[in-house]
Amino acid sequence: MISSDRMAQVDENAAALGVPQKQLMESSGNAVAREVRAVADPGARVAIVAGRGNNGGDAFVAARFLDEYDVSVHLLGRPGTISTDIARENWDALEQARYASQTVTDSRSFELPDCDVVVDAMLGTGVTGALREPEATVAERINDADAAVVAVDVPSGINADTGEAPGVAVEADRIVTFHDEKPGLSSLDADVTVADIGIPAAAERQVGPGDLRPIRSGRKSEDARAYVIGGGPFTGAPALAAQSAMRAGADLAFVAAPETVADQIQGYAEDLIVQPYESDRLRPERVSDILDTAESYDDVVVLGPGLGSADETLEAVSQFLSDFSGRAVVDADALAVVADVDTDATLVCTPNRRELAKMGGPEVESGEEMADYADEIEALAAELGHVVLAKAKDDVITDGEETRICRTGTPGMAVGGTGDLLAGATAGLLAAHDPFQSACMAAYANGRSAELLDDCYKDGLLASDMLETLPRALWGNDDE
């Protein structure tokens, strides 16, 4: 099954793979016509009641495949208000070809013609809430008709994800839904047909621009803070992660770092707030204060960039994770302790192939495709109980039940620091989105930000260059 939100993402991903929505609408309309043929013989009277969105567009296409029937098309609203170009094109095709059609601007005057079949294409899966006018009155007229009712994708007025109707809803006899069944349809007293409309399997399996819909819809956490625990042997990594978190939506980025390197980290960007502690590296005696800070402000933590792999540092990381109960992205050397730590924290782990093996995952040799080990990585995530974003040429993102592959990026990303950007971007998104979703969006945007710079830098790309294009990859028109 597939939710309505996920279906919208998959549609957009299909377009990015070269299967445009116009082509999918043609297939959907053909599927609706097949369903009509299954309930009525040629010559039967078919009334198509269509809304102004793509659900209506599917029905406009269906009319062209039903020339052996007596078809009338009833558009709820004025043609000028049809909401998508492809639906409008298919309405125009009906008018140009002189199909019997009418517009309904006042539901009080609407009379459903005598017919054998009604096609309900008023509203699709993306619309929720009680029906308004004219749809509410038209739904009542459809329910009163002595005709078989075929609903397109979902009966109008029904929530496709729950099967619930907050008000009047169309009582369908048959439903033709597309690509996969919607969760709420199984509870309805109707025959459900799932039509294959040619969406590639990769549109679901592969992370694409559709996966960015949650962030592009404007859902952003207020007062989102990223708290990077890093630095000691290395200074650039925590600075890159913190800046990336801000580029991905964090309002503030703090870096907890040893006093020996705090000034260097601060020098990378004036936007960072560096909080030094007495030491030359992270040690167990520093954990209590750092933990108090992270939990008191409900920060999203990035743990690992630049920390190094000293035994006492790994002991401190283990202690932090054992006591932490918030959200964290674990990266770099800190990943080595994850498999052995019992934690209540919500973790997204971002290993490269070497770090993945240290976590107990598969040993992916240089030159091998990370995606070929997707099943083993999924099993590791299930065992750990955490999201794993295994980064490589093709990233593997899994929560132990669902797994995606991300193929964005360029060869120039082999340069050091791009993994720190990925960890920071994941943290910036984790403030407002669930872990798996955040990891998918961060992986896609990180790779896309490099693609936007490929013409300029090729193999001369620096991780810091990608900070400039990361916001465009997430929120803007990344084709500009």
Image: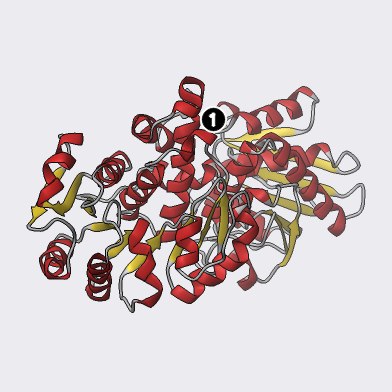
- The residue furthest left is 278
Residue 22 locus on image (x, y percent) = 69, 34
Instruction: Inspect the image, locate mark 1, and give the three-letter code of the amino acid beneath it.
Output: Thr
Left or right of 228: which side holds 93? right
Q: Nearer the viewer, residue 422 or 309?
A: 309
Count residues near mark 1 (Cα–Cα under 10 Å), then give few for <14, some for 14-19, many for 20+. Answer: few
Q: How many marks?
A: 1
Seen at 15% across and 46% down, the residue is 261
Outermost residue to the top: 456
Tell me where residue 17 appears, x and y as whole percent: 66, 39
Q: Is residue 175 rendered to the left or right of residue 338?
A: right
Give whichever of 279, 418 is nearer the camera. 279
Q: How is the image coloured?
A: secondary structure
- Callout 1 secondary element: helix
As drawn, is 267 to the left or to the right of 309? left
Q: Which residue is mark 1?
A: 81
Q: Is residue 331 visible?
A: no
Residue 370 seen in the figure = yes
